[in-house]
Amino acid sequence: MDELVYWLWLASLRGVRPRTKLLLAERFGGAREAFFAGAAALREAGLPREEIEALADKDTEAAKSIAGKCADSGVEVLTLRDARYPRRLAGTYDPPLALYVRGDLPDIDSECCVAVVGTRSATEYGLRMAHRLGWEISGCGGLVVSGLTRGIDAAAAHGALSAGGRCVGVLATAIDGLHGYPEAERVLERGALVSEYPPGTRTLGSFFRARNRITYGLALAALVVEAPEKSGAVGFAHEALEQGREVFAVPGNADSPASAGSNRLIIEGAQAAVCAWDVLGGYERVFPRLRPDGGAPPEGSERYAAEAAGKPAPRPRSGRGNAARRGSGGKKDIDKPKREEYIDLEKQLEQLSAEQLKIISAITQQHTLVDDIIERTGLPAIKVLGELTALRIKGYVSQEPGKRFSLNISQK
């Protein structure tokens, strides 16, 4: 019998916990060996009576049917022992034994993948930021991983695809169940869809929580764009952190209920992010093809957010909206964010807190490293990073590649 059938038998077996299935494959050396393990060996492995009885079911017809459906519909099945199974995912606490794939799955372990998540009930601000960040991540050479559900997830996927990039969508339904995923068909054109559920599986509510471990398991970092206080995205961030993923969050208005959870994550230690390079910059040495000049389409993001929120699309603004343009000589020039106007020091510094003034004083020259700012201020790193984000939003400082900062204020 085909080795794949044994893996599908074990993966789809009812009455056995997912963690137990993984331990069986590890203990006995594979799904085939677990299939032939006797009751005595299972008792010795510490399994309870109920799971030993469930494992006594050696009927493989369902597994053969799944294999046949996948072959007929062009679904690739990656088992935990396959070379193409992402090692990044395999190293998490509870990876699925079988991963069903449609489309062209990149070599995940060689990609700088960012899981972009957030609330389904997103505000126009959240949709705009998710779309923009999805675009920037792709433009900078990263790969967006998305749950694809409406709201933040779909907006990030749309942004990544609009930038000409790829996206990996993680489904909480069967691999052939695309209802409720507005970007799924577009993802298939330039990326891949993955699920731990074979074709024809009936969706259960528990699948959505279970999907989280695959989404952050494929990624190096999790980026929460907008999340209320009691949001699944907040739980996602905590789980991702436990599995060794870096967690970033986009700041929102302090009085916005939609951003209460994401703001709380920043207070608790998540890194604030207002552009893709805030996330990707730390991985530049590991992934040299990453670049900080990917650009973003402000008008494209605004248009998407307005339409998704059911509002009229904003009127185009002259000279904006393109991540790249051609100069008179035909050379392709990347648009970079323009330096803000210098702010009158005497009028503006009185509005800053004591910590912000200390940070301003620590930026003694252009392109100052964040580590030097932290050392000179004596403030905790989390506090410095949070205040730098606030200063950037207000226009007092600019961030450059390599976690360097420059002042935008006149020092007369």
Image (spheres, helix red, strand yellow):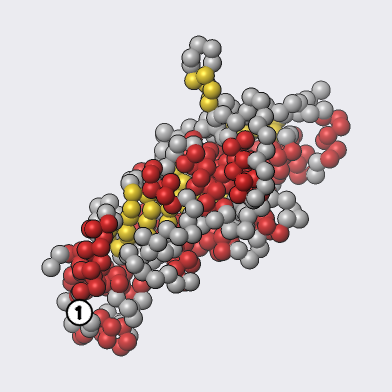
Which quarter of the rendering shows the C terminus? top right
Q: Which residue is mark 1?
A: 58
For the point 33% across and 49% down, the residue is: 103
Q: Nearer the viewer, residue 91 or 341?
A: 341
Counting every numbered tag in the picture gives 1
Q: Is residue 89 left or right of residue 239?
A: left
Instruction: Answer above or below: position of 262 versus 285.
Output: below
Residue sticking out furthest to the left: 1
Counting other residues with Cα less than 10 Å from the Cα at mark 1, is it few (<14), some (14-19), or many (20 or more)?
Answer: few
From this view, report whether residue 4 is shown above or below residue 409. Answer: below
Quarter of the view holding residue 263:
bottom right
- Residue 323: image location, x then y, percent: 55, 30
Q: Report the residue at 36% width, 72% height from top.
A: 18
Q: Quadrant of the N terminus?
A: bottom left
In the rendered image, which quarter is residue 354 located in?
top right
The structure residue drawn at horizontal position 18% and vertical position 82%, both measured from the top left corner, is: 38
Counting from the top left corner in percent of width and height, residue 349 is at: 82, 35
Name above or below for residue 156 compared with residue 231. Answer: above
Identify which residue, 21 or 192, lies in the foreground.
Answer: 192
| Residue at 25%, 52% in the rendered image | 83
> Identity of the amino acid at label 1?
Lys
Residue 387 percent coordinates (x, y)? 70, 44
Q: Nearer the viewer, residue 339 or 74?
A: 74
